[in-house]
Image (tube, rainbow, N blue to C red):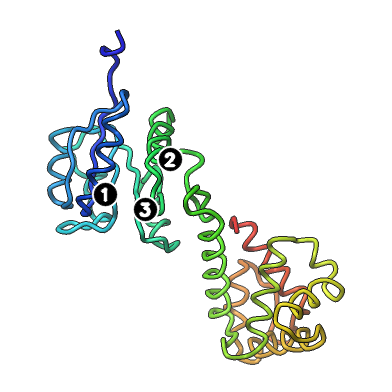
Amino acid sequence: MSEDIQKTKIFISDCNAELRKEIVGAFKREKMFEVVGESGDGYETLEQIKKTSPDVLVMDVVLPGLDGFALIENIMKTNEILKKPKIVVTSSLSHEGFINKAMQLGVSYFMIKPVNESVLIDRVKEICNSPSKQVSTIISKDVTIENASGKYKAKMVEEKITNIFITVGIPAHIKGYQFLREAIKLAIDNPEIINSITKQLYPAIAEKFETSASKVERAIRHAIEVAWNRGKIENINSIFGIRVYSSNEKPTNGEFIALVADKMLIEGA
């Protein structure tokens, strides 16, 4: 009786033949799935999807011929593919921009390689049971995939802080740059620390960098003053989406740290 159950059709697209073989084998061992095809080329994948109409496409974005993003775009807009498959991306490209682009194109899940096969199968089962095209628990700006863990999240926080500092105009070579970066990360991890900036925040940074709390305070103050003196006030205001400051008023260390930390927490840091 169980053989009469309609299986979920899977297509695997990855240029790594050995990895592709392992993924195909993992899905074939699951009774609820039927692997209807595999390919290591973007153009071939597109043509095979037109013929096989899979329910789920598991793919990398690095593909010869037609790259992964172009492949997704073609799948979504090609009229020959009446039944659009749900797409799970497995990729070594872990930059936030790649993830955001994939999600905007309609990908259901983005997983960072190396991917645990059992986790991949669980995620495919999850999206198959979801009534919507995208699962509510997919990666957003805060990546929570098991194999990515806290290391990837930390990397993304670092990148976001760097982008803000570049926009604001805080140069990387000054001492306050590193102190300010550390202060923001501490405020993200423990928002309450901003209420005890002198007794807890500065001493914690000082201990890490083997300096004094007073030097930390002065260096952070200098970093903020450098940004204001460079006259990038509009950039600063644009980051927060409102007119926070004018060129004649500078935030205190605590205000600036809290503003950046709050913004990142709202965005899922």
Residue placed under numbered mark 3 in the picture: 102
Q: Label 2 vs label 3: CA separation?
A: 20 Å
First along the sequence among labels 1 and 3: 1
Q: Residue at x 79, y 77 (%)?
A: 202
First along the sequence among labels 2 and 3: 3
User: In this image, 52 relative to 233: left or right?
Assistant: left
**Identity, as a three-letter code, of the amino acid under mark 3:** Ala
- Element at badge 1? helix
Q: Label 1 vs label 3: CA separation?
A: 21 Å
In the rendering, at what x and y percent does residue 167 appear? 54, 79
Mark 2 neighbour class, 10 Å CA radius: few under 14, some 14 to 19, many 20 or more: some
Mark 1 neighbour class, 10 Å CA radius: few under 14, some 14 to 19, many 20 or more: few
In the rendering, at what x and y percent does residue 266 appear? 63, 57
Residue placed under numbered mark 1 in the picture: 19
User: In this image, 16 relative to 147: left or right?
Assistant: left
In the rendering, at what x and y percent does residue 51 appear? 12, 35
**Identity, as a three-letter code, of the amino acid under mark 1:** Leu
Depth order, front residue of 67/242: 67
